[in-house]
């Protein structure tokens, strides 16, 4: 057995107490903060939007915490370590996506909405069908994202804590789910936001320390890191790891499709959009996105050094053969640099990352059901804030239980398709409807419903009949089952234009016309902020 893998497994088996101890310390500290933050939760605005009391800088940190999931840290580092330049394209795609959010969405969403994405989409359209469709796409994106994070929690166990049996991983998934439910039930958006801020600081600080360490070992010369990666005996690709095409050269169309989903999907992710409502003004919403861009951009530069650093110091073959495969690059690098102590810190940060992201997703999904379906559709807007928050908390329990069961059910499966599906649905269903609602006065209820449901259904069907699910050695159902007839692993290049097309087609064929008065009011509110709900004072 490779000695590096042996030492890694040995360290993981001999120090699970250290790893769990650091993780429990994080949970204990953040739980105290969440309980303190919950003392001011008196209204629906407090529970859903943190009382709109966060500054742009604080919300920018929270957005970074929401956005930088375990996949961003472990997945991208591993992709760069194995595939070089092509792996870094994920970082570029995720970062460029924020320009779309900043320029087209952040300020206008903050001015127009109250708590959820559906508030914007139904502002000048018929409430019931639009809110139902928007809630459906929100729940779909959040659930698939939740599945990926929960399954990732189970997968990380064998890598970080030395637990490799199904029962042990299932218990860890359950523990992550239960802690996440407590965060949301007790703290609401305010408590969850503070968890995101703390986790973002820890994650960026940990990545920064490792980056400086790797550069220090190479005389603070990034070129020397690249040379070491190319010259590592385990690198069989030579200088190809420095050039495009190693991973996506065989099917460039699939790469374009993935890029479209990543770049356009971010501006339609419900749990990211909901962050814009936690600030008091549109100006603070803009500031928060600028802060998020800087923080996320710097972090993705760290992943470039860490990925090539792992390729140089650990080796692609060792990483690929270790428990967890590509995802083991950052922990293996941590072990190489700082031994079991740094590995323990990085493992705790990875679990904290999963906890924070699933908490943000859960509160978004519960708010969508309680605010959009229960209050606005079932109760026709007559439910009290107390009733709405109670339903949101019940929904949190249901979603948490479903996420735990789903995460246990997809253990060992290919979870990449879950993340791809979440981004594809967000880009195909949510973004076209958001942009049409904000910028096209002739957009109608039929166009909104067609766009959202068409984008959702087309993305799901295209993924279901793609090599991601069957007909490929790495497919979810394995190589033995094959009903794939669509060669693309990501549906974005088809489903995103289809979402825009259906929105346009549904609108021009709709004989009914929406209220011009509401359309004008929405335009004024979106562009000026006049009439937007004032900040809640405490």
Image (cartoon, rainbow, N blue to C red):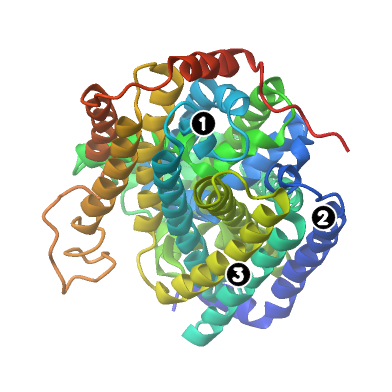
Q: Nearer the viewer, mark 2 or mark 3?
A: 2
Q: What residue appears at the point 22 percent right and 38 percent down from the top-left corner?
A: 494
Q: What residue appears at the point 51 percent right and 28 percent down from the top-left corner?
A: 101
- Tell me the SS state at disc 2: helix
177 up-or-down from 224: above or below: below
Residue 511 relative to residue 487: left or right? right
**Residue placed most toward the observer, 292 or 519:** 519
Q: Which mark is residue 38?
A: 2
Q: Which mark is residue 161?
A: none
Q: Which mark is residue 177?
A: 3
Q: Which of disc 2 and disc 1 is earlier in sequence?
A: 2
**Residue placed most toward the observer, 537 or 167:** 537
Mark 2 is surrounded, within 10 Å at the Cα level, by few (under 14), some (14 to 19) or many (20 or more) other residues, namely: many
Q: What residue appears at the point 46 percent right and 32 percent down from the top-left corner?
A: 121
- Tell me the SS state at disc 1: helix
Image location of residue 110, percent across then percent down: 62, 28
Image location of residue 41, percent across then percent down: 81, 51
* Mark 2 and mark 3 residues within 8 Å of each other at the beta carbon: no
- Tell me the SS state at disc 3: helix
132 up-or-down from 283: above or below: below
What is the count of numbered marks?
3
Q: CA distance from mark 2 to mark 3?
A: 20 Å
Q: CA distance from mark 1 to mark 2?
A: 27 Å
Q: Which mark is residue 120?
A: 1
Mark 3 is surrounded, within 10 Å at the Cα level, by few (under 14), some (14 to 19) or many (20 or more) other residues, namely: many
Q: What residue appears at the point 19 percent right and 42 percent down from the top-left corner?
A: 251
Q: Which of disc 3 and disc 1 is earlier in sequence?
A: 1
**Residue placed most toward the observer, 490 or 330:** 490
């Amino acid at each position: 057995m490779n000695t590096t893998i042996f030492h890694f497994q040995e360290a993981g088996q001999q120090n699970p107490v250290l790893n769990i101890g650091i993780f429990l310390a994080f949970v204990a500290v953040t739980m105290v903060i969440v309980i303190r933050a919950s003392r001011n939760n008196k209204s629906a605005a407090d529970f859903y939007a943190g009382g709109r009391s966060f500054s742009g800088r604080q919300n920018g940190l929270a957005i970074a915490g929401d956005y930088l999931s375990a996949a961003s840290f472990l997945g991208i580092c591993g992709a760069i370590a194995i595939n070089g330049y092509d792996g870094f394209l994920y970082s570029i795609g995720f970062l460029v996506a924020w320009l779309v959010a900043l320029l087209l969405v952040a300020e206008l969403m903050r001015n127009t909405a109250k708590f959820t994405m559906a508030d914007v989409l139904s502002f000048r359209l018929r409430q019931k069908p639009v809110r139902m469709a928007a809630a459906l796409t929100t729940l779909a994106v959040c659930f698939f994202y939740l599945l990926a994070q929960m399954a990732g929690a189970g997968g990380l166990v064998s890598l970080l804590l030395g637990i490799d049996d199904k029962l042990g991983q299932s218990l860890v998934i359950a523990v992550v789910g239960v802690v996440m439910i407590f965060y949301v039930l007790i703290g609401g958006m305010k408590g969850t936001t503070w968890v995101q801020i703390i986790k973002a600081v820890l994650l960026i600080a940990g990545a920064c320390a490792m980056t400086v360490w790797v550069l220090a070992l190479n005389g603070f010369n990034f070129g020397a890191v690249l040379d070491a990666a190319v010259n590592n005996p385990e690198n069989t690709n030579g200088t190809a790891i420095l050039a495009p095409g190693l991973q996506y050269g065989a099917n460039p169309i699939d790469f374009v499709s993935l890029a479209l989903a990543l770049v356009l999907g971010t501006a339609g992710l419900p749990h990211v959009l909901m962050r814009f409502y936690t600030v008091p003004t549109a100006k603070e919403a803009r500031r928060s996105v600028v802060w998020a861009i800087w923080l996320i951009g710097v972090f993705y530069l760290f992943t470039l050094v860490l990925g090539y650093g792992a390729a140089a110091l650990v080796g692609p073959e060792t990483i690929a053969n270790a428990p967890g495969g590509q995802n083991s690059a950052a922990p293996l690098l941590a072990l190489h640099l700082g031994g079991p102590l740094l590995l323990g810190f990085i493992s705790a940060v990875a679990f904290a990352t999963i906890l924070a992201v699933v908490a943000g997703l859960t509160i978004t999904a519960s708010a969508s059901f309680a605010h959009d379906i229960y209050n606005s559709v079932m109760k026709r807007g007559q439910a009290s804030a107390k009733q709405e928050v109670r339903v949101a908390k019940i929904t949190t329990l249901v979603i948490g239980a479903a996420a735990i069961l789903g995460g246990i059910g997809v253990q060992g499966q290919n979870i990449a398709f879950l993340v791809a599906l979440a981004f594809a649905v967000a880009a195909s269903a949510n973004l076209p409807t958001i942009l049409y609602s904000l910028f096209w006065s002739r957009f109608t209820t039929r166009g909104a419903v067609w766009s959202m449901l068409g984008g959702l259904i087309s993305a799901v069907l295209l993924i279901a009949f793609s090599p991601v699910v069957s007909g490929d050695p790495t497919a979810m159902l394995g190589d033995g089952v094959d009903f794939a007839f669509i060669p693309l692993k990501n549906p974005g290049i088809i489903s995103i234009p289809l979402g825009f097309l259906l929105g346009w087609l549904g609108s021009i064929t709709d004989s009914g016309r929406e209220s011009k008065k509401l359309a004008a009011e929405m335009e004024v509110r979106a562009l000026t902020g006049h009439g937007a709900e004032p900040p809640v004072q405490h």
